[in-house]
Amino acid sequence: MLQILKTSLYNVIVIFGQTKTLYGVKMKFNQIIAPSMKELFIKEIEALILSGQLKVGEKLPTERELADEMKISRTIVNLGLSELKNKGFIDIVPRKGAFVADYSRNGKLDTLISIINFNGGRFDKKTVNSIMEFRRINEGEGTYLATKYRTDEDVAELKSILNEVRNCDDPMEIAQKLFKFHHVILCASGNNIFPLVYNAFESFFLKLISSLFVYCDKNSVIDGLENLVVAIEQQDCDEAKRQIEQILSSGIEVINKRCIDYSVY
């Protein structure tokens, strides 16, 4: 049942900082590091839990059994299980063993990052809506603070990004620029946690935003964001918060109305 995918280990090319010339341009190739056996073990157990193959409350095999079946050392299993416990994926009960934990209740930011990275960032509808609702609440408060503490440079950068978006037609490029737009706002809040949490969702947001632009009118989205920038520039905190919450709520409505295939995320 439990078998680590070994291709990651055997298909890795290691390049030791060599400089090559390609089409007349000097390029530096940095060393590529293969994931450790512990990292592969953790990823495999996380995948079994997140996919539902291992259910909440289910007892895992013993360390010896896991080591024998997965052809790895007990030391790796022990270290991996400890990290999985810290992430909220398992509970370790003395003299009884390791059990799958309710990670949705006991997880931490590391757990969320694992969920986002699982299976290339695919989500079910409930998870997508949960993340978007969290974003609406989180960015509402972050935008309120950003409006209060913003600098003229922040406002200028926001306007510049929107001009770039207006002249861009590629959905992924638009998504990248809009991700930066919201990141600038959260950085302006003066609270270091807001942008850190936002960064954890980057891959998810880029895929989601680029998909949304198949259904959304770009100009109407930009108009809404320009109204947000006006409120930020005027330091109208309540209006800026209202604008960002309205923008994100509209996004949630589009997701649900269009029945977007969440499996692509």
Image: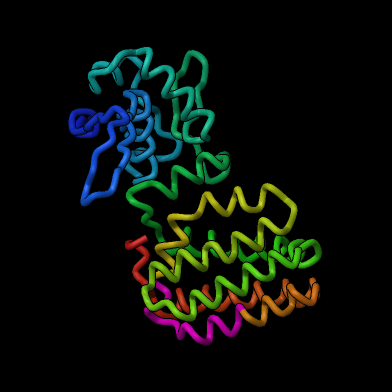
The chosen color scheme is rainbow
Kindly report the secondary structure that dominates the magenta region of the rendered protein: helix
Report the front residue among 72 and 238: 238
Q: Residue at x 60, y 82 (%)?
A: 224
Residue 72 is left or right of residue 236, and the answer is left
Horizontal and vertical percent for residue 57? 45, 35
Residue 83 is left or right of residue 25, and the answer is right
Q: Which residue is drawn at 58% across and 85% down?
A: 223
Where 122 falls versus 18 (above or below)?
Answer: below
Q: Is residue 259 visible?
A: yes
Q: Which residue is drawn at 31% across and 13% down?
A: 73
Of the 4 image quadrants, the one containing the C terminus is bottom left
Quarter of the figure with residue 21: top left
Where 265 falls versus 224 (above or below)?
Answer: above
Quarter of the figure with residue 66: top left
Horizontal and vertical percent for residue 62? 35, 18
Report the front residue among 60 and 202: 202
Report the front residue among 88 and 196: 196
Q: Is residue 1 visible?
A: no
Q: Which residue is drawn at 70% across and 60% down?
A: 142
Where 8 falls versus 154 (above or below)?
Answer: above
Does the magenta portion include 220? yes
Residue 121 is left or right of residue 10, and the answer is right
Where 25 falls versus 80 (above or below)?
Answer: below
Which region shows up in magenta?
A: 211-225
Horizontal and vertical percent for residue 260? 37, 73
Of the 4 image quadrants, the one containing the N terminus is top left
Does the magenta portion include 126? no
Horizontal and vertical percent for residue 261? 34, 69
Q: How many marks?
A: 0
Q: Residue furthest front?
A: 24
